[in-house]
Amino acid sequence: MRDPATEQLVHHLQRPPGDEAADDRLLWIADENALHNLAAVTPAANLTLVSNRFDVAQRARELGFTARFSDFDFSYLADNSIRTAVYRISKERPVVYHILNEAWRVLAPGGELLLSGLKQEGIKTYIEKAGALFGNAQSRKKGMVYLGTALKHHAAPAPHPLDSKQYSELRPIETSQLDFYSKPGLFGWDKIDQGSAFLVEQLPGILLGAGRPPKSLLDLGCGYGYLTLMTRDLALERRVATDNNAAALLAMAKNAEHYALQIEVVADDVASQLAPGFDLILCNPPFHQGFSVDGALTDKFLRQTRRLLSPQGMAVFVVNQFIPLERAAQKYFPVIDTVGRNPAFKLIRLARG
């Protein structure tokens, strides 16, 4: 499904053929909201896309874009080197503030920042913040989308950078159950998700009931790595943790190092590039793509889980009670069991037979 806020920015990313001056560098800052709008933009030599989502960067490269996958790391760009930066706002405030600060740094004097988003996403506030940072900002509404424009008038450092909570840095989090590294922008970044905790609590009994102990684990959509880290007492020969989010991969790698665990940390789009053969797959699946609920994403997680399981393997998903995962899973799995339930969550075991 196309994102209307991204659609309103598309024409700003287009240049007539041949009108691609070296000093007219365009930067497209794209998170998951951009995925279904990529094909509407024609790649150009002076246009670079930066995304914190592996699938967006991968698809952009397939379409011919110059694309970089990172946790919105713009350190490779020199100060005052970009003519136009285009950004459809993200969900997380520290991410947005980090990007606005970096946009100021990399834009050349006379350069322009273009923002878009919906009212309920906080776009009006973000345009005001851009105005405070740049010293000016204009706002207009087109349909349900708000568009903001801020111009950089001089090359001096920003006098009052926005408080991004030091977004670029991982920070240590201490809980009664687990110490770990994480950062804003990740799901449940500074706590232990209750659904994942329920899965971990019930997992020993689920594995005991399965009989055959697993030798390999895949944490599908690992986040900062809670599920993988909590299997550290299992005698596994192989642990793989994968995510689409660059920040999640940084945190997972740091936590593997912190606990001296041998974990393969893989950037991928729902493990699409991994070979099958996992005895155990654990998953607390996302149900949103950007700001929108995405049923196709759930289906993709189930389809990939079916492909990746070993013949005798099993997957355990944790979802909210109201999510009809069992119904969606019937297309892929002959064995579907509810193996745990509490007032908020249920655990669904999936197997190939």
Image: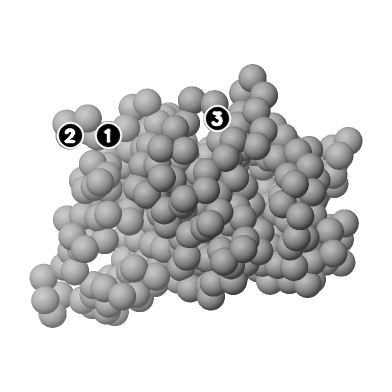
Category of crowding for the residue at label 1, using alpha-carbon neighbours closer than 10 angstroms: few (below 14), some (14–19), many (at least 20)? many
Question: Which residue is at 41% across, 63% downward?
Answer: 55
Q: Nearer the viewer, residue 83 or 338?
A: 338
Q: Marks 1 and 2: CB-CB under 8 Å?
A: yes
The disc label shown at residue 146, or none = 1
x 47%, y 50%: residue: 334
Residue at 77 percent across and 60 percent down: it is 213
Which secondary structure, mark 1?
Answer: strand
The span from disc 1 to disc 2 (Cα, nearest Å) is 6 Å
Q: Which of pointers 3 and 1 indicates the residue nearer the eye?
A: 3
Gap in Å between the C-alphas at discs 3 and 1?
Answer: 33 Å
* Front-lying residue, 279 or 166: 279
Dot 3 or dot 1: first in sequence order is 1
Count neighbours of disc 2 (C-alpha within 10 A) and say few if under 14, some if 14 to 19, many if 20 or more: few
Q: Is 298 placed left or right of 38 in the picture? A: right
48 versus 233 height, above or below: below
Q: Which mark is residue 142?
A: 2
Tag of residue 320: 3
Judge from the rendering whether residue 229 lies leftward or rightward of residue 300; answer left or right: right
How packed mark 3 is, by other alpha carbons closer than 10 Å (few <14, some 14-19, many 20 or more), is some
**Measured from the top left, where is residue 158 in percent x and y?**
54, 50
Query: What colouring does the structure picture have?
Result: one colour
Query: Toward the viewer: 262 or 167?
Result: 262
Find residue 261 and report its image quarter.
bottom right
User: In the rendered image of this protein, does residue 36 appear above or below residue 124?
Assistant: below
